[in-house]
Amino acid sequence: MLHCMYEDVVEYLQLNYMKFAWSVAAVLLVYVVYRVIVGVLESKGQELELEPHIRNIIRLLLRVVAIVVTTTTVFNIFEMPTDIFLGSSALVGAALGFGSSQTINNIVAGFYVLLTQPFKVKDYVKIGDLEGQVEEISINYTNLYTPTFNLLRVPNTQVMNSKILNLTHEGYIKYTFKVGFGHDVTEKQVMDKVVKPAIEEFQENCGNGGFRCPEVYMNAADRVGKTYMIRLFIPKGEARTLYTMQPDLTRLIMRKYDDVRAVQ
């Protein structure tokens, strides 16, 4: 039985060796053309300063086109009916649907993120309870550079299902944080002897005149104390600077606050 099967395979290869040769040649040709186009895309993308996510979209579309062209060419060479292709696609799709639903959902979410562009690479964003600078947007994940100085890979399904706050506007990361004070210090003392002097010292020591001056405004007050919002303006793409400057400014404010309380 095995001998008969072996003879059938040999006979089939002998009758169709040219088709196999043409198929291999077609696959190699499509691959070479694909690599050349991708190489041109990379060079032209850098030359035209295209956003990385746009280059990712074009690269993905080229990959899909290459797969479709390769599959269609091979089926035509072997003169296979298209219903086989459709049946195989349905079978593969069902298998993927049952066995890899999370992966498929993630890929669909990746397409959504890439096409709708709720943020771009180097934007500073808050995604649900997460925050950080976007370092890469791929089909499966969005990579964030977090305040802990680590890279966090966020599944795109989580991105799509979360509230997204983009803090990057007009070339700046506009980052706002809260600072609270007790009623033992008046509002005038807070502004004149705590917040404003701290911002001036911060601008002199940390900003070196190269950063836009932080802004401050009162947020809320209750029987316990009062809260102020401090807004920093950090150039886009410099999250590391934000992660060091925000604690520095907070320490300056608290130091000025302690000084005011000490003389009372």
Image: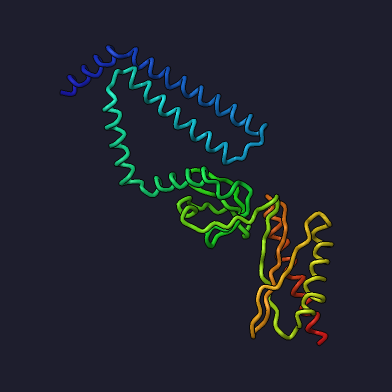
Residue 91 location, quadrant: top left
Q: Which residue lies furthest to the bottom in this view?
A: 264
Please provide percent x and percent y for residue 144.
58, 52
Please provide percent x and percent y for residue 178.
66, 70
Left or right, residue 85 beside residue 53: left
- Residue 224's place in the image compared with 54, above or below, is below
Please provide percent x and percent y for residue 52.
60, 40
- Point out the image quarter for the N terminus: top left
Left or right, residue 141 beside residue 170: left
- Residue 92's place in the image compared with 37, above or below, is below
Residue 229 location, quadrant: bottom right
- Residue 126's place in the image compared with 179, above or below, is above
- Point out the image quarter for the C terminus: bottom right
- Pick the residue in front: 54 or 201: 54
The residue at 29%/25% (across/down) is 82
The residue at 22%/20% (across/down) is 6
Please provide percent x and percent y for residue 198.
80, 70
Residue 197 location, quadrant: bottom right
